[in-house]
Amino acid sequence: MPVSERVREIEREIDTSISEMQAWRTPKATMLEDIMGVYRDSMELVALEFMHARVFDLSPEELGSQFAREDLTRSGVLWALKWASEYCLETSISPAINTRELVGLTFLGSTYEAFVDALKCANWDLIAIHVDEDSRTINCYEGGDASGFDVRIVERARISAPSTPHASLTLDEDQLTSRWTAGDYRRVTHSLAAYAARHENTLLVDPQFLAINGLPEVETPQPTLVWLDRPNVEPDSFVFDDLVLPAIMEPTLKWKLVSLLDTPVVQIGERYCALSSDLKAVAVLDDYMLRLAVRIDEQQYSRASLLREERMIRACAETLERATRPWIVENRVLYSNPTEEADVLARRDADSLVIQLKSTLRPQTPWEVFKRNEDLLTGLRQTRSLLDRRVAQHGFVITDGYRGDYICWKRALDEGVPIATLYDLGIIAKDLTSAVSAVKKRVGIVDGATSPEALADREGDLVGWTLRIIDAEAP
């Protein structure tokens, strides 16, 4: 059911209240710098929490909650920066707001992000929104225990991300936008990351405490704000400019900016700053390069993405053909009545295998999770259809990164079509039976496991309204 007119009225009321907040009377440069200061402090606390997790070997569930806190912090800061860019004046006689109020703005931002995603999902009948006028509460019902299981698998995917990152299929010479190549982006971000690393201190756990408890040395870089010089040569300056959060926040633009790591550099007056840990993240993970490219030059990015698709097919074919017991491989096999295409079809002795490929960058918001899932569900349907017409005995959907959440895996289990990544190709080429079990285990699916209890209600303040996310069916 589409979002009701009453909920849209409340949305407009909330937006007006935010735009009229006293905080925006602070000069823009002052406000932006203060928000970045709060961001640094918050991420330093996150770094300390991860150090604690390493020392005391916390469970995956506890680690997952810390990843969630990191995401909430980043989304809240991004909205605070977007609002400051949109509403603050360049000059003002109002004094800067205090730290408590700044932290409150970031909390408001993270709640507002949840509200935005709830509205998007409600338009697709993914959640139900009920308004309690008496208590001024916006109740968002996410569904039954499936979403609780969903969260567990998504958290596990975050925990395993360092060992199973997005498989890069982008070469330095690929022209991702009309102004820069992948190599240009990598060169600039690697330089910024190296500069940031030189300005970081190191956080250490007391060596005496570790020695007494028989634990190894634990240390981590301390996130810090670094001030940057804009490159004065092209195309480096083009890359740098695209990494900068737009100084003029047009209404249509602010809805497209959903991840601070896409544009981690903030212009403050005539200077530029970023969090050191963010610069290092974007230099390591190609996801952010590709996300940035598709936003600023979708047409050119689409041309470059065709090259990545061909490389995915080639990677599958080469791994299967080079196996100890080689497969005979065909690519892009077309069938008629009805028209369907198998990306990869392979045969070895009595075994046959069909693979459908999906390029899926790791989602950054719940709405992006839904869109990525739709791609994977399409792949599952395509593979199942090919298996039903006896094109092959076994089928896999293979991605270059994101494996999907519980909704995808429930369908995958029902259809008998596992979701693997390019990193799983080796075990698939070796033995199909053991590959199915290994892939399920990597995702976190254990035979005989039951769905966990529903998540606790989550609440946040929205300038006079309370947003409540409820892991249950609507009454």
Image (cartoon, rainbow, N blue to C red):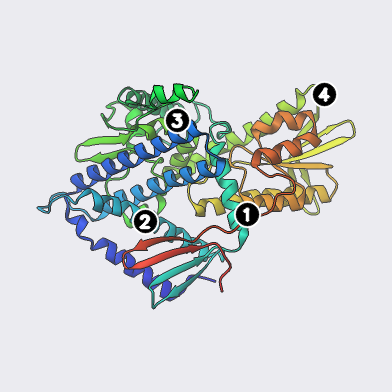
Give the residue at mark 3. Answer: 181
Q: Secondary structure at mark 1?
A: loop
Instruction: Say which of 443 and 220 sits in front.
Output: 220
Q: Mark 1, residues whose alpha carbon is within 10 Å: few (<14), some, or many (≥20)?
A: few
Q: Amino acid at mark 1?
A: Pro
Q: Amino acid at mark 2?
A: Thr
The disc, 2 or 4, on the residue closer to the chain's N-terminal end is 2
Give the residue at mark 4. Answer: 325
Could you say where residue 389 lies in the image, as x and y percent from the top left?
84, 50
Q: Nearer the viewer, mark 1 or mark 2?
A: 1
Task: Evaluate whether residue 304 shows in this view.
Answer: yes
Give the residue at mark 1. Answer: 452
Q: Which mark is residue 252?
A: 2
- Cβ atoms at labels 2 and 3 below 8 Å apart: no
Q: Nearer the viewer, mark 2 or mark 3?
A: 2
Could you say where residue 124 lies in the image, as x and y percent from the top left?
55, 64
Q: CA distance from mark 1 to mark 4?
A: 41 Å
Q: CA distance from mark 2 to mark 4?
A: 54 Å
Q: Secondary structure at mark 4?
A: loop
* Quarter of image, res 218: top left
Q: Amino acid at mark 3?
A: Thr
- Cβ atoms at labels 2 and 4 below 8 Å apart: no
The disc, 1 or 4, on the residue closer to the chain's N-terminal end is 4
- Cβ atoms at labels 1 and 2 below 8 Å apart: no
Could you say where residue 150 lies in the image, as x and y percent from the top left?
59, 52
Instruction: Say which of 176 and 359 sits in front.
Output: 359
